[in-house]
Amino acid sequence: MTDPTPPDGQPSRGVSRRGVLGLAAVAAAGTAVGFGTGRATSSGADDPRRGSHAFHGDHQAGITTPVQQHLYFASLDMTAGASREDLVSLLQDWTAAAAQLTAGQEVGESGATDGSPLAPPDDTGEALGLGPHNLTLTFGLGASLFDREGDPFGIAARRPEALTPLPSFAFDLLEDAISDGDLCIQACADDPQVVVHAIRNLSRIAFGRAQVRWTRLGYGRTSRTDAGQQTPRNLFGFKDGTANILSDDAEALDRWVWASDGWMAGGSYLVARTIQMTIESWDRTRLQEQELVIGRTKGEGAPLSGGTEMTEPDFAMRSSTGDFAVPSTSHVRLAHPDLNDGVRLLRRGYNYVDGNNDLGQITAGLFFLSFQRDPAQFVQIQTALKTDALNEYIRHVGSALYAVPPGARRGEHIAQALFES
Ligand code: HEM
């Protein structure tokens, strides 16, 4: 899919199109720095389409990788009657396809156009010529995969203790249809068609073994995971991702993000929450009130106790009214490590818009994604957010938790250690 066309826009003669695509993809993959650790390629600096991230590595890419602009997330369930062999073969096939997709190659043996005219093509073709656009594919396993009646996958005894369904939280209005799932795939890239193509082809490969349960299309990152990235804004218009765990903070990653037990060592746990925002009532709220709800200024993103975006909030400071400058019900105060035994999360969420309701109100919100070494970290912070003034403007409508296995090394498939004794 990487487009190697010379400036005149025509592939060079004498080399088959597929051959050219393959060479370009290999070149792109070969320049990827830091296996699976989320570093962009040097070639990506010249042409954003060619930036790529190696699929294989110690950790899965798509966690500390600089957050891309677009997301397509899929939750899947194993088909009724599926066996352990079906699950393992699916993970093997996904691994092979993910390595091709993230390198900008077409999926399968014969790609989109080189197969038999009498058979459907291996690759669906809509990403031809687009390039990898920093695509990462991150796979996760839900608790229901381990809990299935009769243990058809033979993994019940290997379920990590941390993979326990999340408790109910105050204000939860969860819908089954957009919650949970046996497996998940998080596709992130800097082009929307590239993420859709990836999920479409991976779910097609799953046919007969697993089917899609729900999906979420996210545009516009609401976080940063790399010091070089600008802080983006969420749909409330505030900078989001200021106080996140960044890719160069090895100590924080080890302490708060990477799991260390058993087959999950080097993996992480992913919480995915679909949080609807009541955009219309927020937009009718005074600027001063909006800032008191968040605890930061809207323009600069500075804490209300003063300074600039990166200044640490001073939670003891009082305003002229005698109240805390960063109010006791503000989001930033309640979510801050100082009030949560030091607990931190790596946030990697996206804005979403999903049509409108009968009243003409836009259905939009934050697809909140956080990675942590133990879901208890999320539980602690979400519990603390019970008195968050933001609750008047948001509703959690979808929820899921997945174990994200460590990265697959070359020759291995995703979650291979789970199936080895
Ligand atoms: C629609 C819902 C949400 C909105 C609009 C939102 C918005 C924000 C904003 C604007 C900030 C300040 C900038 C920053 O440091 O990133 C922030 C910080 C933060 N949020 Fe949220 N957030 C939402 C949901 C959540 C949830 C569900 C959690 C976790 C349970 C969470 C955890 C945090 C954390 C840990 C911080 C950093 C606090 C700090 O260390 O200063 N947020 N959020």
Image: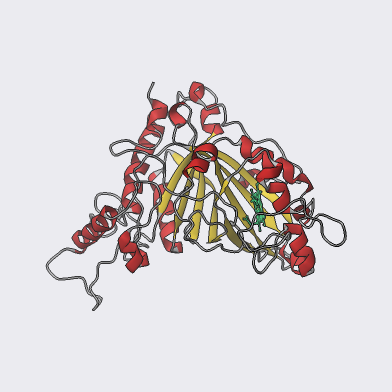
Q: Which of the 4 image quadrants contains residue 174?
A: top right
Residue 42, image x, y percentages: 32, 60
Residue 199, image x, y percentages: 44, 52
Lateral position of residue 67 relative to residue 58, left or right: right
The answer to whether residue 255 is visible is: yes
Looking at the picture, tell me which residue is in the foreground, 282 or 97.
282
Residue most toward the left?
A: 14
Lateral position of residue 95 relative to residue 335, left or right: left
Residue most toward the bottom?
A: 8
Residue 176, image x, y percentages: 64, 43
The answer to whether residue 151 is visible is: no
Question: Image height check: is 141 above or below 272?
Answer: above
Residue drawn 38% across and 53% down?
A: 39
Looking at the picture, tell me which residue is in the foreground, 383 or 16.
383
Q: How is the image coloured?
A: secondary structure
Residue drawn 65% across and 36% down?
A: 166
Question: Could you tell me which quadrant the C terminus lies in?
Answer: top left
